[in-house]
Amino acid sequence: MIRGIPTLDDLGDVSGKRVFVRADFNVPIEDGRITDDFRIRAALPTLNWLRERGASVACATHLGRPKGTPNPKYSVAPIRERLAELAPDVELLENLRFDPGEEANSAEFAATLTEGFDLYVNDAFGASHRAHASIVGPPKTLPSAMGLLLAKEVEVLLGLRNDPKRPFVAVLGGAKISDKLGVVEALLDVVDALVVGGAMCFTFFAAQGRPIGDSLWEPDQVETCRRLLQQGKTIHLPEDITGVDANGNYATFGTRLPDGAKGFDIGPGSAAAFSDIIMDARTVFWNGPMGMFEDERFASGTRTVAQAMADTKAFTVVGGGDSAAALAQFRLDTDVDHVSTGGGASLELLELGDLPGLAALRGAPNAHD
Ligand code: 3PG
Ligand code: MG
């Protein structure tokens, strides 16, 4: 039991038992091919733990957002193929979101999922912020546990939230502050410094009264950014920006962008400053790229931050999604302490300290013996 949540050991003898494992195999697929199988490999320790102890295992995942109707575009067939190579005797059911009952959290759909199974294991960290049928339904009826991946994610992320080694620095990027406002406010309460890059910095610049040219920003979040800046916490914003000028030519600017200019990355001075902050920290959480790293001209801010994450002696945690993809692109993903398999889930766990999927497991029939 960890934080009132049953773990695999709390399932008792699993030999001969039929176990339903909810995994998050929502992986990127292009032309029918998986381009990154990180989430599939991350579930193997749990699948192997169960198989080695004689359980028979079936798993299920969602893939994309097919909105309750079967759609060949979102078939899990490529995942089933990869899983057959990694864990040959593990069955994979069809995309959970082909049924409207999944997202509607229907009790009937949950009952069809658990029928014929003895035990439920949730190892779908990346989907545990969703109160969907396969996440919160089965623990109402079956003895349940969190898998090894889910347990690791919870331990690492709640560790950051509750007792980080200091200085604790959070590095946030990405396009929108509105997507991350809750977690920004929660993080400001626990971190020693917040570092802001990505297009979201332009809304902060606007709040400081700096001209941002034609850069991406969120006018309705300017007041919020002003309030965050006035809290007296340490917030590091970029000191220079790279992007294009009004004629579309590559250019580096200070923190006042000329008319018609667009910022697409933090500049070299900011990248060096952010890197120093990461090197001097003892705990670093990073979520969101510093710029449009898919375009090589605007990848250096994100690459410098990724390299500092790899080089620092601090305990380093990377929130999933784009920052994990950036790390993998720069081949630095094995050089940080923990790459979360959850994007939204990692932010929500940091913000709220709990997730619907965890709460459900705490209420499972075997959670109170
Ligand atoms: C993710 O990729 O973020 C998770 O698998 C959750 O997917 P969702 O955002 O479509 O619920
Ligand atoms: Mg997502």
Image (cartoon, helix red, strand yellow):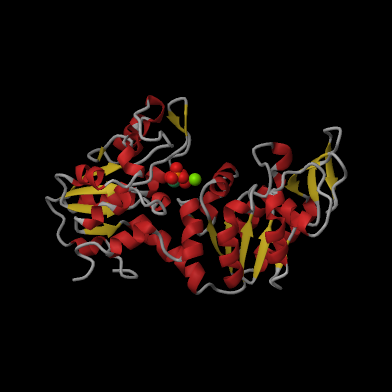
Task: Identify the residue at horizontal 73%, vertical 69% (top origin).
Answer: 230
Residue 226 seen anywhere in this rendered image of the structure: yes
Quarter occupied by the C terminus: bottom left
Task: Identify the residue at horizontal 21%, vertical 70% (top origin).
Answer: 368
Q: Nearer the viewer, residue 83 or 115?
A: 115
Tell me if 251 is positioned left or right of 305 in this view: right
Quarter occupied by the N terminus: bottom left
Tell me if 77 is positioned left or right of 258 in this view: left
Which quarter of the figure has residue 63? Answer: top left
Residue 70, position in %: x, y?
Answer: 34, 29
* Above or below, comparing residue 87 to residue 148 in the picture: above
Task: Identify the residue at horizontal 47%, vertical 64% (top origin).
Answer: 352
Residue 142, position in %: x, y?
Answer: 19, 55
Tell me if 201 is positioned left or right of 107 in this view: right
Q: Nearer the viewer, residue 279 or 102?
A: 102
Residue 49 seen anywhere in this rendered image of the structure: no
Residue 9, position in %: x, y?
Answer: 23, 63
Which quarter of the figure has residue 311? Answer: bottom right
* Above or below, comparing residue 172 to residue 160 in the picture: above
Task: Identify the residue at horizontal 56%, vertical 66% (top origin).
Answer: 186
Q: Nearer the viewer, residue 198 or 91?
A: 198
Q: Across the whole image, how many numbered discs are drawn on residues?
A: 0
Residue 233, position in %: x, y?
Answer: 68, 71
